[in-house]
Amino acid sequence: MAVSAAHCARRALRYRHQHRAGGLRSGRRAMGTAGLRSLRFDNLALRSLPVEPPREPGSRQVPAACFSRVRAAPVERPRLVAQSLPALRLLDLEPEGEPGWEQELAEYFSGNRQLAGSEPAAHCYCGHQFGSFAGQLGDGAALYLGEVLNSKGHRQSDGRKVLRSSIREFLCSEAMFHLGIPTTRGGTCVTSDTKVMRDVLYDGHPIYEKCTIVLRIAPTFLRFGSFEIFKPMDESTGRKGPSCGRNDIRVQMLDYVIGIFYPEIQSAHSQNTLQRNAAFFREITKRTARLVAEWQCVGFCHGVLNTDNMSIVGLTIDYGPFGFMDRFDPDYICNGSDNGGRYAYNRQPEICKWNLSKLAEALVPELPLEESQPIIEEEYNAEFEQHYQQKMRKKLGLLRHEKAEDEELVSELLHVLQIAGADFTNTFRLLSEIPIPGASTLFTLEEFLGKLIEQCATLEELKLASKPTMDPRLMSEMLDIICLDISDIMIMRYDV
């Protein structure tokens, strides 16, 4: 899908660490009208990367550009559903309680009114989706509002979705942050009376739902797929990136990403571009490994780990059909359209590693594969295992000593959870209440074991979970094939 201005409705503000000479205004602004209108926009991405010349709204190929200027499509009667005050404080916004400030928030963060200094744009990127190169994608349903410089010198920056999915995204992004997992933030959730048709159950019976807008906040929304706009013709799909052959823009993008979001790497390797690019790739490899290790430790399944959903700074981005496991199942799939289980819970680490290999390909020739591939092999698995085991030790309360048998203990525990059909999160939560003589007397040992067993599945539930399942469409296709084969056999016998 090409970059589209016609359906943009999810807003985002970006933030990043910025070091400048001289002081910046201190203190937080009020959340009233004056506070919103005095946000200090400094849209460095649009000044640093190519922007498409002005065009009429619509889907199209966007060659030789990273952004297209667009206008937000207005919605009817926007109103605030939810807000995250800690996230909004990243913008130096604090609620005053003055009359009308919630409506101001809804008007501006729905895109119905444009903030002074905001420069709405759609980002052009590509991606490998379910293993195949999909060509140009981009912000068909999202909108970059700009970058805000707050009082601490940090830079804050963010389609048309419906209420149910928007509430899920808003709540999950904030939950992930408070779980200590790197993520975009959810600033506001604004719904409206504008309607769109959606097939909720994918059963051919669509219904009208309210358009809803989530304000996303992050240092940047650049992703692995941002570099895939330079990809040459793909042998399998016949598609190529819209900026294929434009290595000059790839250099610009690397300079921008490393200089702004990895300043310590830029400073350490300012005289050697190859070493700088290799150090950057090593760091994003480690960040990605640590990120997916965090997911595994809380039972989070992203659901759509395409390369265009992988953050270039190691954040959890693009909350779609995500899910948290209830009963522990390594093969857990949260995406109903993932028939092959490519993005199942237990495959997330290897998929993220595969996605890094696609990023490596997208950085050639500025970082040759003979430099990047060994980095993945040297760093990724080791970083993932170290971080995963460290987090799992904490979940089990093993804080004082690290022992060689800890890894086996974690593995055996997860095996028991699987065969018992135990609830992943509740079991670990309950383990924190295990009775320890002289230290914890909340339950007797017998009471604790009873509560632990309550978290396990019943025999009937285990039978149901173990029953083989097949997508109805695949079942229909298989039955058609079987019927054809039987017909062919009968014809052959008749001919004989």
Image (cartoon, rainbow, N blue to C red):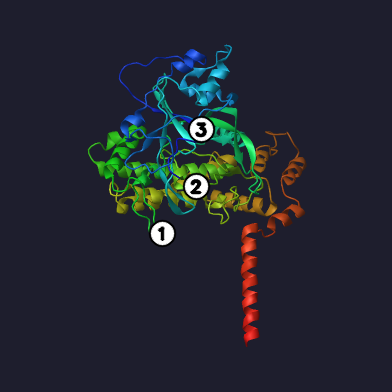
Name the element at disc 3. strand
Q: Is residue 398 above or below residue 149?
A: below
Q: Which residue is disc 2 drawn over?
A: 305
- Work out whether residue 148 can be spotted: yes
Q: How many marks?
A: 3
- How far apart in space, not on screen, are marks 1 and 2 (Cα)? 20 Å
- Sequence-first tag of 1 and 2: 1
- How far apart in space, not on screen, are marks 3 and 2 (Cα)? 20 Å
Q: Residue 251 appears in which quarter of the rendering?
A: top left
Toward the viewer: 155 or 462?
155
Q: Which residue is disc 1 drawn over?
A: 236
Q: Residues within 10 Å of mark 3 (few under 14, many from 20)?
A: many
| Place of residue 392 in the rendered image (x, y in percent of width and height, measured from the top left) | 56, 43
Residue at image point 39% right, 51% down: 357
Residue type, numbered disc 3: Arg
- How far apart in space, not on screen, are marks 1 and 3 (Cα)? 33 Å
Name the element at disc 2. loop
Q: Residues within 10 Å of mark 2 (few under 14, many from 20)?
A: many
Residue at image point 74% right, 36% down: 443
Residue type, numbered disc 2: Leu
Q: Which residue is disc 3 drawn over?
A: 10
- Sequence-first tag of 1 and 3: 3
Q: Quadrant of the N terminus?
A: top left
